[in-house]
């Protein structure tokens, strides 16, 4: 579904590549957690997939169509296929849950409709159904600034779902949340992955979450893929190589 071929990124002014000859192939069934210490290249990787960052060399294909060399018009279509969730949610604080979720349709509606804020009855119904899916029906009209972090991320997920994407990308979506809330958000993401057949690729710092929820782990170090495999095969040795430090025993001592 997504093919990543010889992907490299060298930012202007840097001497070291931030991604270096990355080759990966992702399928619809994958729920991928991307691990790596700070600066390993995780955000750059996600930004390349959704076309926000142009690689220095290499190519990314979505269902056989180039993302890397797409025109602005093609890129707009490709981005509609890809929902994105963020660490800091990127919501509009003074708008309601419903209004924020509806902004997820802006990429594919005529701009005059966005300007006057006109939505059809079907669009409103669909927005309400995705809000129900993330468990926020009771809060539909509440301003987003009044919500907790976990609730805000649920709005972020609903805003991605309203696009009816085939791919969901997340750049550290739980980094600002406590462990219990992070687990609940991952449970929701896994449900959405299974229910909607969404290829999911998420950067995460928390290895425990990755081991619990991912169907596949990709680890980056200095811009290179150093592990691509099943969560159970990401053991102490892989942890040490990825983070250059020893893991806490409980990660590997117990079944998680
Ligand atoms: N716009 C940029 N210009 C120059 N260098 C950049 C830019 N963005 C990232 N880098 C560099 O690229 C490398 C990878 O950064 P990236 O943000 O992709 O890593 P990361 O794994 O997501 O880190 P973190 O977990 O801290 O967010 C780092 O060395 C970083 O300094």
Image (cartoon, rainbow, N blue to C red):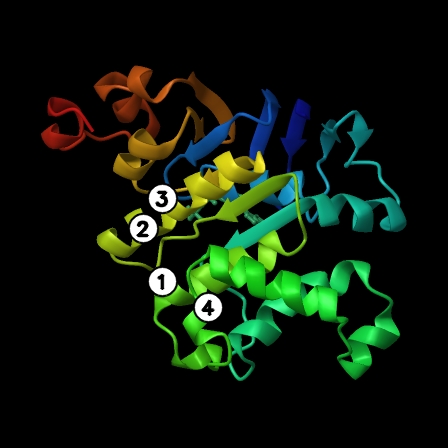
Q: CA distance from mark 2 to mark 1?
A: 8 Å
Element at label 1:
helix
Q: Which mark is residue 137?
A: 4
Q: CA distance from mark 4 to mark 1?
A: 15 Å
Q: CA distance from mark 4 to mark 3?
A: 18 Å
Residue pictured at 84% horizontal, 36% vertical: 69
Decide: is 33 above or below 252: below
Numbered disc total: 4
Element at label 3:
helix
Earlier-in-chain disc, 2 versus 1: 1
Element at label 4:
helix
Q: Residues within 10 Å of mark 2 (few under 14, many from 20)?
A: some
Q: State left or right for residue 96 relative to residue 152.
A: right
Q: CA distance from mark 2 to mark 4?
A: 17 Å
Q: State left or right for residue 49 relative to residue 96.
A: right
Q: Is residue 12 visible?
A: no
What residue is shown with label 3? 187
Whether residues under marks 4 and 1 lie with C-beta atoms below 8 angstroms apart, the answer is no
* Label 2 near ligand 1 (CB < 8 Å): no
Whether residues under marks 2 and 3 lie with C-beta atoms below 8 angstroms apart, the answer is yes
Q: Residues within 10 Å of mark 3 (few under 14, many from 20)?
A: some
Earlier-in-chain disc, 4 versus 3: 4
Decide: is 214 above or below 24: below
Decide: is 66 above or below 179: above
Residue pictured at 61% horizontal, 75% vertical: 99
Earlier-in-chain disc, 2 versus 4: 4
What residue is shown with label 2? 184
Picture quadrant where residue 165 is located = top right
What residue is shown with label 1? 150
Residue nearest the viewer, comparing 119 with 249: 119
């Amino acid at each position: 579904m997504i093919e990543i071929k010889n992907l490299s990124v060298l930012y202007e002014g840097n001497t070291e590549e931030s991604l270096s000859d990355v080759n990966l192939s992702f399928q619809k069934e994958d729920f991928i957690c991307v691990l790596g210490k700070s600066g390993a290249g995780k955000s750059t990787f996600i930004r390349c997939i959704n076309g926000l960052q142009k690689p220095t060399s290499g190519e990314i294909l979505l269902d056989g169509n180039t993302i890397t060399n797409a025109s602005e018009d093609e890129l707009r279509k490709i981005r509609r296929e890809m929902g994105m969730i963020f660490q800091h949610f990127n919501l509009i604080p003074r708008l309601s849950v419903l209004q924020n979720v509806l902004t997820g349709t802006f990429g594919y509606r005529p701009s005059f409709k966005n300007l006057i804020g006109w939505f059809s009855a079907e669009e409103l119904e669909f927005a309400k159904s995705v809000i129900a899916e993330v468990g926020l029906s009771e809060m539909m009209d509440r301003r987003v600034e009044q919500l907790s972090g976990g609730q805000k991320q649920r709005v972020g997920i609903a805003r991605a779902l309203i696009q009816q994407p085939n791919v969901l990308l997340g750049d550290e979506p739980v980094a600002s949340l406590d462990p219990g809330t992070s687990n609940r958000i991952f449970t929701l993401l896994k449900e959405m992955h299974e229910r909607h057949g969404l290829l999911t690729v998420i950067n995460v710092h928390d290895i425990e979450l990755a081991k619990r929820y991912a169907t596949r782990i990709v680890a980056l170090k200095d811009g290179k893929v150093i592990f691509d495999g099943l969560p159970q095969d990401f053991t102490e040795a892989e942890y040490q190589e990825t983070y250059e430090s020893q893991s806490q025993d409980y990660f590997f001592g117990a079944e998680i």
